[in-house]
């Protein structure tokens, strides 16, 4: 649809017959069968999410920078934004903070106890885990569907030499 407008598209994720797009303030969906563009979530004047609160998808303020997006096998949409991972539930028309908090830090744990610092790109593995590029923490984190987050790779310090290592002994740099 050439009449659709986007504002700073950030990430694209293919799922079944659709493309899911993150852009400033919104999550958009493009149907590949007819190129129809719809808005899944986002409202610049909507409600801010506090920890673990539910909001209707069209009344969720995503902020200026929703980043990575993935869609699970059971059609749950996960979005990295600010310092947390949102779950967008299309069946229940709701969104809530799945893991993390509004407070930036580097803390592994479960649910609201987890702290990210600028989570960006997301990737799914075949078992349902989500891998997160935690930009300011210089780590790759693993999020399981029970909301447990653990550091997967990276010592948490910038490495401008790009040396290699294994697991938590590897240093990566934003």
Image (cartoon, rainbow, N blue to C red):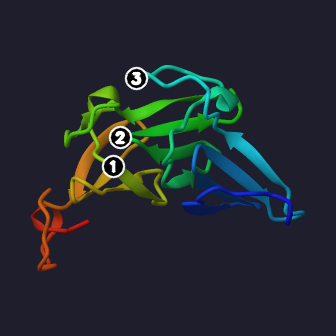
Q: Earlier in the sequence, mark 2 or mark 1?
A: 2
In the rendered view, would you say 110 is above or below 83?
above
Circles 2, 3 touching at the beta carbon (< 8 Å): no
Q: Residue at x 50, y 25 (%)?
A: 48
Dot 2 falls on a residue whose secondary structure is: loop
Cα–Cα span, label 2 and label 3 = 11 Å
Residues at discs 2 and 1 in contact (Cβ within 8 Å): yes
Q: Residues within 10 Å of mark 2 (few under 14, many from 20)?
A: many
Residue of label 3: 51
Front tag of 1 and 3: 1
Q: Nearer the viewer, residue 146 or 42?
A: 42
- Residue drawn at x 48%, y 48% is 65
Location of the C terminus by quadrant is bottom left
- Check disc 1 and report its element: helix, strand or loop: loop
First in sequence, mark 2 or 3: give its number. Answer: 3
Q: What residue is pinned by disc 1?
A: 118
Between the residue at mark 2 and the residue at mark 1, the CA separation in whole angstroms equals 5 Å
Q: Which mark is residue 83?
A: 2
Residue for point 34% across, 31% down: 101
Please tell me whether mark 3 sits on a helix, a strand or a loop: loop
Q: Which mark is residue 26?
A: none
Q: Position of residue 47 (x, y in %)?
A: 56, 22
Q: Position of residue 35 (x, y in %)?
A: 85, 63
Q: Position of residue 7 (x, y in %)?
A: 64, 56
Question: What is the spatial separation of the Cα atoms under label 1 and label 3, in whole angstroms?
Answer: 17 Å
Res. 149 image quadrant: top left
Instruction: Say which quarter of the image contains residue 108.
Output: top left
* Crowding near the residue tagged with mark 3, few <14, some 14–19, many ≥20 C-alpha atoms within 10 Å: some
Residue 18, position as x, y percentages in the image:
74, 59
């Amino acid at each position: 649809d050439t009449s659709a407008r986007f504002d700073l598209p950030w990430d694209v994720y293919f799922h079944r017959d659709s493309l899911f797009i993150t852009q400033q303030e919104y999550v958009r969906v493009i149907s590949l069968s007819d190129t129809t563009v719809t808005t899944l979530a986002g409202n610049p004047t909507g409600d801010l999410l506090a920890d673990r609160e539910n909001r209707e998808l069209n009344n969720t303020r995503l902020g200026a920078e929703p980043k990575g997006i993935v869609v699970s096998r059971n059609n749950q949409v996960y979005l990295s934004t600010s310092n947390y991972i949102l779950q967008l539930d299309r069946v229940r028309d709701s969104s809530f903070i799945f893991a993390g908090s509004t407070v930036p830090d580097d803390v592994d744990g479960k649910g609201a106890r987890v702290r990210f610092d600028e989570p960006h790109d997301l990737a799914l593995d075949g078992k349902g885990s989500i891998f997160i590029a935690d930009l300011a923490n210089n780590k790759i984190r693993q999020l399981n569907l029970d909301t447990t987050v653990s550091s997967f790779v990276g010592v948490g310090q910038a490495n401008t030499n790009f040396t290699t290592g294994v697991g938590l002994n590897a240093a990566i740099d934003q």
